[in-house]
């Protein structure tokens, strides 16, 4: 599956936040990530589902949870990582594109 990744930065004084857009043929999702959480994305590829998910950013007004299992990153959008409303999986290699897009924003 090809996933297109884009990120834009919003700056208010010293504060920065990012809007991350993930788009594929069958979905598009926008995730808002505070600047202080952006570096945590570098740990997602090594965070295993068995060890718990990482809460980074929000989408549609609720938290976003990230974890990796068997070469895929699960992105869970909802109240918590077990009672989510929206879930999608992307190949773990997409994390490099996400990290690069945020660094370039």
Image (spheres, grey):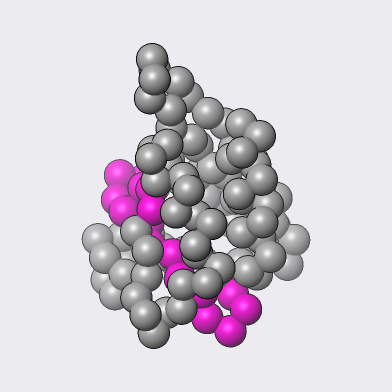
Q: Quadrant of the N terminus?
A: bottom right
Whether residue 80 is situated above or below residue 35 in the rendered picture: below
Taking depth in this image into account, of 50 and 21 the one nearest to the observer is 50
* Viewer can see residue 85: no
Q: Quadrant of residue 53?
A: bottom left
Pinpoint residue 97: horizontal percent, then vertical percent.
68, 52
Residue depicted at 61% across the width and 59% down the height: 95
Q: Is residue 61 magenta?
A: yes
Whether residue 16 is situated above or below residue 68 in the rendered picture: above
Query: Magenta span: helix, strand or loop, mainly?
Result: strand
Taking depth in this image into account, of 78 and 104 the one nearest to the observer is 104
Instruction: Say how many tags the image has.
Output: 0
Pinpoint residue 48: horizontal percent, then vertical percent.
46, 78
Pinpoint residue 3: horizontal percent, then vertical percent.
69, 57
Residue depicted at 27% across the width and 71% down the height: 83
Whether residue 49 is situated above or below residue 101 in the rendered picture: below
Q: Is residue 26 left or right of residue 52?
A: right
Taking depth in this image into account, of 26 and 82 the one nearest to the observer is 82
* Viewer can see residue 103: yes
The stretch of residues the image draws in magenta is: 56-72
Residue depicted at 34% across the width and 75% down the height: 52
Farthest right residue in view? 2
Residue depicted at 58% across the width and 40% down the height: 102
Q: Quadrant of the C terminus?
A: top right
Q: Is residue 68 left or right of residue 80?
A: right
Whether residue 86 is situated above or below residue 83 in the rendered picture: above
Q: Is residue 52 magenta?
A: no
């Amino acid at each position: 599956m090809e996933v297109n990744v884009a990120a834009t930065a919003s700056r208010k004084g010293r504060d920065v936040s990012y809007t991350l857009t993930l788009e594929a043929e069958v979905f598009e999702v926008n995730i808002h990530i505070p600047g202080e959480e952006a570096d945590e994305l570098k740990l997602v590829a090594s965070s295993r589902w068995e060890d718990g998910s990482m809460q980074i950013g929000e989408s549609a007004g609720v938290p976003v949870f990230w974890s990796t299992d068997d070469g895929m990153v699960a992105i869970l959008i909802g109240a918590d990582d077990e009672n989510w409303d929206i879930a999608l999986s992307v190949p773990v290699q997409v994390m490099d594109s996400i990290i690069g897009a945020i660094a370039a924003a």
